[in-house]
Amino acid sequence: MQYQSKAAIRPLVAALVFAFASAGAVQAQDAKPAADPAVANQLDPNAPEKDDKLIDKYQAVKVEDGKYFDKDGAPTYHITNDGKKFDWYAYSGYRRYHAECHVCHGPDAMGSTYAPALKDSLKRLSYEEFVGIIAGGKQDISSSGTNVMPAFGDNKNVMCYADDLYTYLKARASGAMPRVRPTDKEDKPEAAKKAEKECLGG
Ligand code: HEC
């Protein structure tokens, strides 16, 4: 199972490298600023694409040992200091995402030709649905494509950080976290250190 998914990634990486290289070439030729606002929006890492309804829905109403929860009781992000300082889990999720998921789902959860933009998926997926998909994988049998979401159920580097990933992707879905690498963050909570140790070691 794991062997299969590794083999599947190889041609994909090549395709991505090629796509990035060609995108760079086009940009270099065209030095003028993009006139199309949609394009400009994609290129400006700080361009706001906030969804007020989701920001409201995903708002933290409770905190327990440094982990925040929204009114549905699901883990969520918490951003302070004028949108610059992130809770530990959202920050950790950013790093985990860019270690385990971005090769298929694109940087900053923006999607690729291979896999959907998770910043859009997280507008509708519940916590349970999200964890179920990363544990069990997903293959859309109705589509003619053969793109597969691998099952990460036995990968501790993913499953031990499911809440972190979910929290980060919610912040991307609502637009609370722009396309930038978070710099300021809350300290790693003792509870996170303990849970991590138990999960990785067990
Ligand atoms: C080998 C490429 C690959 C990797 C790595 C990967 N995914 Fe996926 N993922 C996919 C594909 C392809 C789909 C679409 C599957 C389908 O709908 O049939 C998908 C679908 C999903 C979905 C469902 C999206 C929706 O709109 O229903 C979620 C959630 C998801 N992936 C999360 C993740 C997370 C989190 C990670 C990192 C831990 C990750 N994926 C890593 C390829 C990948």
Image (spheres, rainbow, N blue to C red):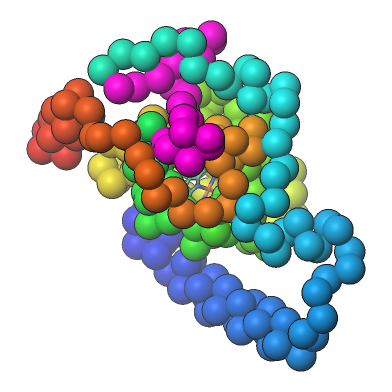
Residue 70 drawn in magenta = yes
Dividing the picture into quadrants, the one containing residue 159 is: top left
* Total marks in image: 0
Dividing the picture into quadrants, the one containing residue 104 is: bottom right
Q: Is residue 179 visible?
A: yes
Residue visible at 46% across and 33% down? 81
The answer to which of 134 and 45 lies nearer the viewer is 45
Q: Quadrant of the C terminus?
A: top left
Q: Is residue 59 left or right of residue 4?
A: right
The magenta stretch is 66-86
Residue visible at 80% across and 74% down? 33
Q: Is residue 38 above or below residue 27?
A: above
Q: In the image, residue 88 lies at what x, y percent?
A: 33, 35
Q: Residue furthest right?
A: 36
Q: In the image, residue 52 lies at what x, y percent?
A: 72, 26
The answer to which of 75 and 140 lies nearer the viewer is 75
Residue visible at 53% across and 9% down? 71
The answer to which of 68 and 72 lies nearer the viewer is 68
Q: Is residue 156 left or right of residue 73?
A: left
Residue 138 drawn in magenta = no
The answer to which of 148 and 183 lies nearer the viewer is 183
Q: Is residue 108 left or right of residue 187?
A: right
